[in-house]
Amino acid sequence: MSTADQLIIFDTTLRDGEQSPGASMTQYEKVRIAKALERMQVDVIEAGFAIASQGDFEAVKAVADTVKNSIVCSLARVMDADIDRAGEALKGACSARIHTFIATSPIHMQYKLRLTEEEVLARAVKAIKRARRYVDDVEFSCEDAVRSEPDFLCRMIEAAINAGAGTINIPDTVGYAIPERFGALMATLLERIPNADQAVFSVHCHNDLGLAVANSLAAVQQGARQVECTINGLGERAGNAALEEVVMAVNTRQDLFTVNTRLNTKEIVPASRLVSSITGFPVQPNKAIVGANAFAHESGIHQDGVLKFRETYEIMRAEDVGWHTNKMVLGKHSGRNAFKARLDELGITLADDQALQEAFKHFKALADKKHEIFDEDLHALVTDTQKQAEVEVYQLLSLKVCSETGTTPVAMLELKVDGQVKVAESEGSGPVDATFKAIENIANSGTHLELYLVNAITSGTDSQGEVTVRLNKAGRVVNGQGADTDIVVASAKAYLNALNFVLVGTKPHPQTDGV
Ligand code: KIV
Ligand code: ZN
């Protein structure tokens, strides 16, 4: 395979994915996901927006210091401070990229930036040159490219390449494109820009019209050689192009695509589960590739066909994307070494021996309640024990719920709040409602519950329930998670986890600011 045939997969789950309301991740979680992406052989991992906060800086740095076989990238606006912060965070990376961007559409330049075309062009060129002082690998994005004037876009991109950008990204920032037109735009740019052959052209499509993957593929057919995407299609608003769909479309329709990726597709389903478990964004059952029903043949006719000759109804093999690889790994009699060995195989590293000890204690408690422990259980257990906000104000000490037909459920609980033990009791319309009300009797948080979701991690009634709670406090949205074989306990843990995140400060959004 020549390099011209390689389609570069640029994953932005940790940056654009994190911009989904409530999907913010801790540094530890970002490193876990980055390792899963590295195992999958993703080419570029966009680890975050280093200038956004000290936490974001540390997370980009931690990913850069950990990942060895993928390029690690940080986003930066075309501002000196952004570029310097990105350069600083990426210092320890084996291969680093700075991704700088500015909007090029009339609507963004006039109303958001209040800059002329010439000013935008000059700032972009200056930023690219500054980024080149830190790294050889610089990507430039024309934000809202789809609604930009083609003449200006061509001029901007030519100047960006001359300034040293090796990758030019064409984002459909607002998800407005239609495949045929978007493909034509890519063809026009490649044809009209005199130095286009000196850069890799990339696409970054949002899914507002449900066309992000279709648009990305249309551009690939016209010569784009990098696709920016996210696991499970996570991302701002309706999300980004789903990595798993782009990659499997290219792999499955080799009759139509002249490109290939270097991805290990067997890591797709494990990565999808990890991202879902960490962010609390569930995967819908009918989601392509990674949904629980994606390979389930319900109707008798289909089952009959598949049994006679698999290709009658299956265009891909479930095992090629990592289904059915969840082994029964551990049980009640497994020791600490076996537990640690399986965590290592799953790419999960705990901070220190104390964290391992703590996780092992939880594992033993789980194994007492649940006969067979699967990989998904281990992921949930680690997420549950490690998903802590920077501020751990609320901790669950005990919970008792009385629920009986014909009576009103009552919850009694004990919390540790800033080191002090507090007790509360409440009735509710159900056991979970009573529990949340009892928590609020203590916390009085002023938050609004936006989402309450329970998901069985594995099959069987002894499965752990994984609960996501989304809270909104004055427009700030956070997700909390909890897992337990008792879903009321899991719910309480998730609610308290969200409350702890509410107490952590906000951070700026890269695309709302001017320059
Ligand atoms: O959607 C977008 O335009 C972006 C850019 C920062 C690349 O996310
Ligand atoms: Zn985006």
Image (cartoon, rainbow, N blue to C red):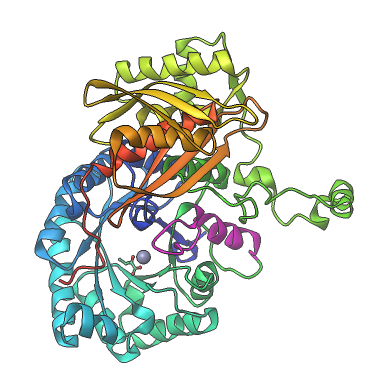
Outermost residue toward the left in this view = 80
Foreground of the two, 496 or 108: 496
Place of residue 408 in the rendered image (x, y in percent of width and height, measured from the top left): 55, 32
How many discs mark residues in the rendered view? 0
Give the residue at x 53% y 67%.
213
In this view, 371 is above or below 28: above
235 in magenta: yes
Foreground of the two, 89 or 459: 459
Q: Quadrant of the C terminus?
A: bottom left
In this view, 233 is above or below 127: above
Give the residue at x 37% y 17%.
358
Asked if residue 50 lies left or right of residue 376, the reply is left
Give the residue at x 43% y 43%.
469
Place of residue 352 in the rendered image (x, y in percent of width and height, measured from the top left): 29, 20
Regarding residue 67, the answer to whether it shows in the image is: no
Stretch in magenta = 232-254
Outermost residue toward the bottom in this view = 151
Asked if residue 185 lies left or right of residue 445, the reply is right
In this view, 379 is above or below 282: above
Asked if residue 30 lies left or right of residue 507, the reply is right
Place of residue 35 in the rendered image (x, y in percent of width and height, measured from the top left): 39, 39
336 in magenta: no
If the picture is divided into quarters, which one holds ligand 1?
bottom left
Image quadrant where residue 81 sits = bottom left
Place of residue 200 in the rendered image (x, y in percent of width and height, measured from the top left): 37, 69
Foreground of the two, 191 or 77: 77
Give the residue at x 42% y 14%.
361
Asked if residue 149 lies left or right of residue 51, the reply is right
Regarding residue 308, the answer to whether it shows in the image is: yes
